[in-house]
């Protein structure tokens, strides 16, 4: 059942996941910590954070472990409940469960998406206090926190002072931050380092080409494309998969091969119009029960 739930989580197959959950209950299978953690993870990754919270609350009165807390904290964070994930972390510590490296990864990721720089620094400093040795993933999260917040010079300084060598994910986060916040001089420096570090990664060439294109240095942008061709690097199109009525649908940017592409683009146009008009629809009440008060 754990393996099947994992497959449902990767596919985003919520209906199948719910069917598996019903089967577990109907067959009265023992709800072990690992199985309940898998249920929480599946529901969170399939977009049903309310169901994930329901499984967590039912399990909280029974035996739990740090894995289950991590799954719920990470689920809340990935759905934008940043403050709630931090509150759950404090409740975790009050319940005498000790955070591990995964706990801090979930929390630092939450701070990154929530723009909580101060909280991220506190958590990063708490790593060693909690007996957790910072790993490259934790350093990468801090770079992402600073870069997203526009503190790209601080992020560059943080990378320079690290006791470990920078990874592609760290420099990639910094590059995105430089582009989003208009520091194109630093972006070019970081982009070149990325290509040296990962010469066969198509995204690194595209990233630097975009930097040149934004600055209207079209010749330099073209040279990046030519460099990709010389090295045999091909750009792989990213895609998304979503399940509707039991059928998975695959989407690629600007693709119009889907049978309902006309309707889909019409809805996207409508959503864009609403955003331009600053129309705000509040869905928070739907999730209020799942995050507590």
Image (tube, rainbow, N blue to C red):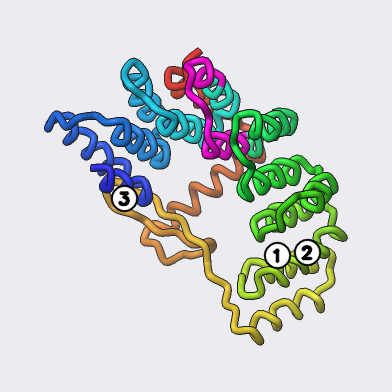
| Residue contact at pointers 1 and 2, CB within 8 angstroms | yes
Work out whether 138 lies above or below 253. Answer: above
x and y, in percent, of residue 225 in the image: 69, 78
Q: Which residue is mark 1?
A: 207
| Residue contact at pointers 3 and 1, CB within 8 angstroms | no
Disc 1 to disc 2, C-alpha distance: 6 Å
Question: Which residue is at the front of the view, 20 or 243?
Answer: 20
Work out whether 44 lies above or below 201. Answer: above
Could you tell me which residue is drawn at 50 percent across and 54 percent down? 265
Report the residue that reaches farthest toward the right: 185
Residue bounds of the magenta highlight: 90-110
Work out whether 280 lies above or below 262. Answer: above
Q: Is residue 181 visible?
A: no
x and y, in percent, of residue 47 in the image: 42, 38
| Residue 274 quadrant | top right
Q: Is residue 177 visible?
A: yes
Could you tell me which residue is drawn at 34 percent across and 38 percent down? 38
Foreground label between 3 and 1:
3
Disc 3 to disc 2, C-alpha distance: 38 Å
x and y, in percent, of residue 271 in the image: 55, 42
Q: Residues within 10 Å of mark 2 (few under 14, many from 20)?
A: many
Q: Is residue 96 shown left or right of residue 233? A: left
Could you tell me which residue is drawn at 72 percent across and 46 percent down? 143
Q: Which residue is mark 2?
A: 211
Q: Earlier in the sequence, mark 3 or mark 2?
A: 3
Q: Is residue 109 magenta?
A: yes
Q: Which residue is mark 3?
A: 7
Q: Main secondary structure of the magenta part?
A: helix
Q: Is residue 24 magenta?
A: no
């Amino acid at each position: 059942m754990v393996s099947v739930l994992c497959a449902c989580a990767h596919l985003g197959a919520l209906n199948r996941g719910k069917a598996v959950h019903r089967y577990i209950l109907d067959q009265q299978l023992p709800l072990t910590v690992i199985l309940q953690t898998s249920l929480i993870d599946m529901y969170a990754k399939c977009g049903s954070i309310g169901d994930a919270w329901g499984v967590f609350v039912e399990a909280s009165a029974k035996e739990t472990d740090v894995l289950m807390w991590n799954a719920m904290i990470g689920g809340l964070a990935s759905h934008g409940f940043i403050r709630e994930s931090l509150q759950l972390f404090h409740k975790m510590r009050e319940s005498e469960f000790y955070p591990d490296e995964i706990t801090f990864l979930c929390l630092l990721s939450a701070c990154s998406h929530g723009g909580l720089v101060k909280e991220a620094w506190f958590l990063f400093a708490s790593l060693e206090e909690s007996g957790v040795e910072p790993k490259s993933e934790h350093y990468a999260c801090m770079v992402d926190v600073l870069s997203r917040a526009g503190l790209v010079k601080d992020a560059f300084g943080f990378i320079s002072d690290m006791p470990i060598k920078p990874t592609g994910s760290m420099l990639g986060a910094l590059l995105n931050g430089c582009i989003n916040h208009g520091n194109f001089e630093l972006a070019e420096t970081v982009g070149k380092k990325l290509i040296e570090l990962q010469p066969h990664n198509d995204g690194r060439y595209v990233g630097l080409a975009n930097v040149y294109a934004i600055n209207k240095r079209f010749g330099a942008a073209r040279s990046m494309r030519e460099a990709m061709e010389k090295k045999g690097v091909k750009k792989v199109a990213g895609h998304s998969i979503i399940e509707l009525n039991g059928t998975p649908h695959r989407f690629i940017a600007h693709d119009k091969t889907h049978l309902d592409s006309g309707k889909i683009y019409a809805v996207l146009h409508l959503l864009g119009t609403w955003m331009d008009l600053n129309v705000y629809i509040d869905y928070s009440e739907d999730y209020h029960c799942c995050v507590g008060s």
